[in-house]
Amino acid sequence: MQKNTPEHYPEWITRVELPKEGGTVCHTVCDDSATLVYLADQACLTLHRWLSRTGRIDRPDRMVFDLDPAGTTSRRSARRRPSRANCWTACACPRR
Protein backbone atom coordinates (compact mmCIF):
# COMPACT_ATOMS: atom_id res chain seq x y z
CA MET A 1 0.00 0.00 0.00
CA GLN A 2 1.33 3.43 -0.94
CA LYS A 3 1.18 5.86 1.98
CA ASN A 4 3.34 8.72 0.70
CA THR A 5 1.50 11.18 -1.50
CA PRO A 6 2.95 10.71 -4.99
CA GLU A 7 4.91 13.63 -6.42
CA HIS A 8 2.66 13.81 -9.49
CA TYR A 9 -0.42 14.75 -7.40
CA PRO A 10 -1.54 18.35 -8.01
CA GLU A 11 -0.25 21.03 -5.63
CA TRP A 12 -3.83 21.98 -4.61
CA ILE A 13 -4.24 18.65 -2.79
CA THR A 14 -3.66 19.07 0.94
CA ARG A 15 -0.94 16.95 2.52
CA VAL A 16 0.17 16.32 6.09
CA GLU A 17 3.61 15.05 7.04
CA LEU A 18 3.68 12.77 10.08
CA PRO A 19 6.47 11.04 11.96
CA LYS A 20 7.03 7.33 11.54
CA GLU A 21 9.71 4.96 12.67
CA GLY A 22 12.87 5.96 10.83
CA GLY A 23 11.52 9.16 9.25
CA THR A 24 8.27 10.74 8.11
CA VAL A 25 5.40 9.95 5.77
CA CYS A 26 3.39 12.46 3.72
CA HIS A 27 -0.32 11.54 3.67
CA THR A 28 -2.94 12.92 1.31
CA VAL A 29 -5.76 14.76 3.11
CA CYS A 30 -9.16 14.49 1.45
CA ASP A 31 -10.70 17.73 2.67
CA ASP A 32 -12.84 18.80 -0.28
CA SER A 33 -14.93 17.33 -3.08
CA ALA A 34 -12.31 18.06 -5.77
CA THR A 35 -9.75 15.93 -3.91
CA LEU A 36 -12.30 13.16 -3.44
CA VAL A 37 -13.01 13.13 -7.18
CA TYR A 38 -9.28 13.13 -7.97
CA LEU A 39 -8.60 10.22 -5.59
CA ALA A 40 -11.54 8.25 -6.97
CA ASP A 41 -10.16 8.77 -10.48
CA GLN A 42 -6.81 7.41 -9.26
CA ALA A 43 -8.61 4.32 -7.84
CA CYS A 44 -6.80 4.82 -4.56
CA LEU A 45 -9.46 5.43 -1.92
CA THR A 46 -8.96 3.56 1.34
CA LEU A 47 -11.81 3.81 3.78
CA HIS A 48 -11.18 4.17 7.52
CA ARG A 49 -7.59 5.27 6.93
CA TRP A 50 -7.29 7.86 9.71
CA LEU A 51 -9.93 8.48 12.30
CA SER A 52 -8.48 11.75 13.55
CA ARG A 53 -8.05 15.25 12.16
CA THR A 54 -4.72 16.62 10.97
CA GLY A 55 -4.43 19.07 13.87
CA ARG A 56 -5.03 16.36 16.49
CA ILE A 57 -3.54 13.14 15.11
CA ASP A 58 -3.23 11.61 18.58
CA ARG A 59 -6.94 12.24 19.40
CA PRO A 60 -9.20 10.15 17.10
CA ASP A 61 -12.76 11.39 16.61
CA ARG A 62 -14.20 7.89 16.46
CA MET A 63 -13.40 4.20 16.67
CA VAL A 64 -14.42 1.75 13.94
CA PHE A 65 -14.71 -1.99 14.33
CA ASP A 66 -14.44 -3.79 10.99
CA LEU A 67 -16.19 -7.05 11.75
CA ASP A 68 -15.67 -9.75 9.13
CA PRO A 69 -17.47 -12.86 10.37
CA ALA A 70 -15.90 -16.21 9.62
CA GLY A 71 -17.49 -18.33 6.88
CA THR A 72 -19.20 -20.53 9.46
CA THR A 73 -20.78 -17.63 11.36
CA SER A 74 -24.52 -17.32 10.86
CA ARG A 75 -26.00 -14.02 9.64
CA ARG A 76 -28.01 -13.77 12.84
CA SER A 77 -24.88 -14.07 14.96
CA ALA A 78 -22.99 -11.55 12.81
CA ARG A 79 -25.80 -8.99 13.20
CA ARG A 80 -25.61 -9.25 17.00
CA ARG A 81 -21.89 -8.43 17.13
CA PRO A 82 -22.08 -4.73 16.17
CA SER A 83 -24.52 -4.02 19.00
CA ARG A 84 -22.09 -5.62 21.45
CA ALA A 85 -19.26 -3.50 20.01
CA ASN A 86 -21.36 -0.34 20.40
CA CYS A 87 -22.05 -1.21 24.01
CA TRP A 88 -18.35 -1.82 24.66
CA THR A 89 -17.39 1.45 22.96
CA ALA A 90 -19.94 3.42 24.98
CA CYS A 91 -18.62 1.90 28.22
CA ALA A 92 -14.89 2.11 27.38
CA CYS A 93 -14.65 5.56 25.82
CA PRO A 94 -15.23 8.63 28.01
CA ARG A 95 -17.52 11.31 26.65
CA ARG A 96 -15.88 14.54 25.47
Image: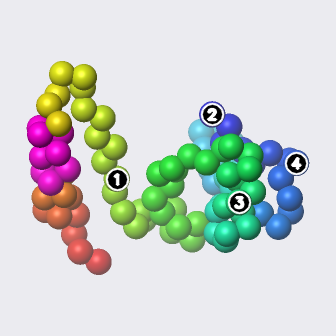
Task: Please check the rendered image and state whether residue 32 is part of the magenta-colored stretch, yes or no.
Answer: no
Chain-order first, disc 1 or disc 4: 4
Cα distance in 3D space between marks 3 and 1? 24 Å
Point 40% across, 67% down: residue: 61
Residue at the disc numbered 1 = 64
Left-right relation of 54 to 82: right
Report the amino acid beneath label 3: Val
Chain-order first, disc 3 or disc 1: 3
Front residue of 34 and 18: 34
Q: Residue furthest front?
A: 75
> Is 48 located above or below residue 75 in the figure?
below
Q: Residues within 10 Å of mark 4 (few under 14, many from 20)?
A: few
Quarter-wise, where is residue 60 in the image? bottom left
* Label 4 residue SS: loop
* Label 3 residue SS: helix
Cα distance in 3D space between marks 2 and 1? 20 Å
Q: Residues within 10 Å of mark 1 (few under 14, many from 20)?
A: few
